[in-house]
Image (spheres, helix red, strand yellow):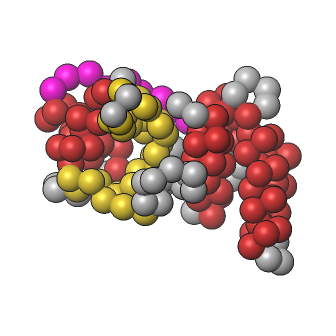
């Protein structure tokens, strides 16, 4: 996964979780996320988001940064057929309005690239995804048919990162 894509996606996830009312346990990350909200211009918000992404990556990488921000972080690797995958997604969403992070694969002429995406909603037929990476050709806010999403998720090792309401340090 490209670092630019990863940093943008993980910083956006932290921002969305904070906006959803989940407390950020790490004071520095909370301050930087708040700076995005209080920015006076789009340019200032962009700079604040870059600072948030950089802080989130240190030390130990983005996964560790989210762990510092949200100690209730749950990481699952889902095994099984497409029905098991669909069931795991729906269970993770049931009663949980918070976004989830998943790795999904994109096929290109040169092979397969894995990227992180934010899952906002899952229905019987489709998955609502936010891909906040402005440097790729993927629409930032889009839907995929559920079966297409599952195939791409399986190609990326079926990692599902969930946050539960009420996660507190």
Where residue 60 sits: x, y (%)? 73, 23
Q: Specify whether 99 is left or right of 93.
A: right
For the point 65% across and 56% down, the residue is 15
Total labels: the figure holds 0
In this rendered view, identify the residue nearer to me: 61 or 105: 105
Q: Does residue 90 lie above or below 83 as drawn?
A: below
Where residue 149 sits: x, y (%)? 27, 43
**Secondary structure predominantly adopted by residues drawn in magenta:** loop
Q: Quadrant of residue 36?
A: bottom right
Q: Specify whether 40 is left or right of 94.
A: right
Q: Specify whether 125 is left or right of 110.
A: left
Q: Does residue 86 lie above or below 165 as drawn?
A: above
Quadrant of image for the C terminus: top right
Q: Does residue 55 lie above or below 22 as drawn?
A: above
Is 72 in the magenta? yes
Q: Quadrant of residue 32?
A: bottom right
Where residue 137 sits: x, y (%)? 45, 53
For the point 20% across and 53% down, the residue is 145
In this rendered view, identify the residue nearer to me: 127 or 30: 127
Where residue 147 sits: x, y (%)? 17, 43
For the point 33% across and 34% down, the residue is 109
Which residue range is magenta in the image?
70-81
Q: Is residue 22 visible?
A: no
Seen as rendered, the residue at the extreme front is 109
Q: Is residue 149 visible?
A: yes
Is 104 in the magenta? no
For the point 36% across and 27% down, the residue is 111
In this rendered view, identify the residue nearer to me: 144 or 98: 144
Q: Does residue 109 lie above or below 34 as drawn?
A: above
């Amino acid at each position: 996964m490209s670092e630019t894509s990863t940093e943008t996606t993980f910083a956006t996830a932290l921002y969305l979780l904070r906006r959803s009312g989940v407390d950020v346990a790490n004071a520095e990350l909370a301050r930087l996320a708040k700076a995005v909200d209080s920015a006076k211009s789009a340019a200032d918000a962009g700079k604040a988001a870059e600072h948030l992404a950089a802080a989130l990556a240190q030390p130990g990488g983005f996964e560790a940064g989210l762990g510092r921000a949200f100690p209730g972080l749950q990481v699952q690797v889902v095994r099984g057929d497409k029905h098991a995958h669909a069931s795991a997604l729906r269970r993770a969403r049931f009663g949980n309005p918070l976004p989830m992070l998943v790795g999904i694969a994109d096929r290109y002429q040169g092979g397969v690239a894995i990227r992180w995406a934010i899952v906002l909603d899952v229905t019987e037929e489709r998955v609502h995804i936010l891909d906040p990476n402005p440097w790729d050709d993927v629409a930032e806010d889009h839907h995929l048919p559920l079966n297409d999403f599952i195939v791409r998720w399986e190609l990326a090792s079926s990692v599902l990162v969930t946050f539960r309401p009420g996660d507190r340090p």
